[in-house]
Amino acid sequence: MNDYQKILDAYGLDTSSEIKPLGNGLINSTYIVTTPEGKRYVMQRINTNVFPDVDALQDNIERVTAHMRGKLTAQGVKDVERKCLHFVPNKIDGKTYVAITEEGATGYWRLMDYIDDSVTREAVTPESAEAAGRAFGEFQSMLADMSPLPVETIKDFHNMEFRLRQFDEAIANDAAGRLDGVRDLVNDIQTQRDIACTAERLQREGKLPVRVCHCDTKVSNMLFDRDGNVLCVIDLDTVMPGNILSDYGDFLRTAGNTAPEDEPDIDRIAINRPVVDAFTRGYLSTAGSFLTDVERSLLPHGQFRFAYMQAVRFLTDYLNGDTYYRINYPDHNLVRARAQWRLAQLAMNR
């Protein structure tokens, strides 16, 4: 019996079910399972290099989806199962994942119901940006009273102070001998350290609330029905405590840029204002009910914060010798860093 058959058997599914790759995700390996009866599921292998604590990961997701399902039911929403992901318990111990060991290696797999007549989208337009804003704002709104909070699935993922400590270490070590060639960019980035860490400072002062955030907001992390309406938010692995800038700013870092994140010609980089305005309008229409005055005032800072953070991360990796991000040519990370720094500069003046 091969690995796939073992997984299907653990979930009580016919081992002759058809299995095909699904999507183009960069983290987890994802497949669609179709049983002989025509029932479909999404099957994923969890990337334990990124998410080593599978128990905590799945506990987060189970609590988040249960909380959302309760809210949707209380609101009288129809077709709740199409508006919220459902992970299937296995038949061995009832967990929403199963460990499969073969040839000394253990893989962690999970199964969720496939939502029929749903599609994902990649293109960002003002219309899809507004839909994304509404969806992610509603997601945060439904989880605003969740207690206890989820745990961190990736420690310090959106912690600016942590990213700057990594940056300082890369500068001090100069592992790839590249520092002299980028001192101009290093010095420019250093000038905005204090502003970039505004959120961390306000959280310590108790002025910026901790929220349940998705932390990977993009159009492709939503399911749409055939009429273009948003069904639900997906890819919940990064749901964890944070602040509202995590979801607002991270979306606009990519979607609110007129150029790719690795654009070599910085003159082509500009703020995509129709997308920024549309996403903001959609976000405030659903998240506005719980946002504090401080949170509202910080929204324009979000796009700067995440462009700056990504400039720091790309330049850190460049100084370290390109050990983290996949590159397509020798200076790819430097090009990325300069492009993100340009976006950050533009966002400062939004």
Image (cartoon, helix red, strand yellow):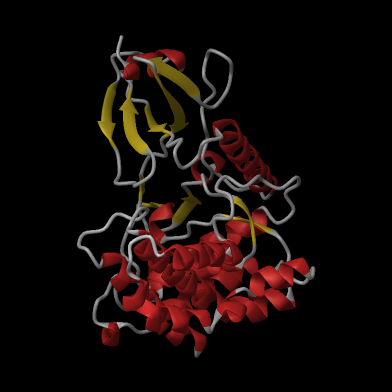
Residue found 35% across the figure and 84% down from its top: 270
Residue found 24% across the figure and 82% down from its top: 265
Quick check: 28 left or right of 282? left
Judging depth in this view, the residue of 24 and 309 nearest the camera is: 309
Measuring from the top left, give residue 89's x and y in whole percent.
54, 23
Give the quarter of the image for residue 209: bottom right
Give the quarter of the image for residue 140: bottom right
Measuring from the top left, give residue 231's x and y in whole percent.
47, 51
* Quadrant assignment for the N terminus: top left
Number of numbered markers: 0
Q: Report if residue 22 is visible in the image.
A: yes
Q: Report if residue 271 is visible in the image.
A: no
Q: Is residue 266 above or below residue 135?
A: below
Measuring from the top left, give residue 238's x and y in whole percent.
53, 49
Judging depth in this view, the residue of 220 and 78 nearest the camera is: 220
Q: Is residue 212 above or below residue 89?
A: below
Judging depth in this view, the residue of 188 and 280 nearest the camera is: 188
Quick check: 73 left or right of 128? right
Measuring from the top left, give residue 71's x and y in whole percent.
68, 47
Q: Is residue 161 above or below residue 268?
A: above
Quick check: 146 left or right of 173? right
Residue found 31% across the figure and 64% down from its top: 123
Residue found 54% across the figure and 12% down from its top: 92
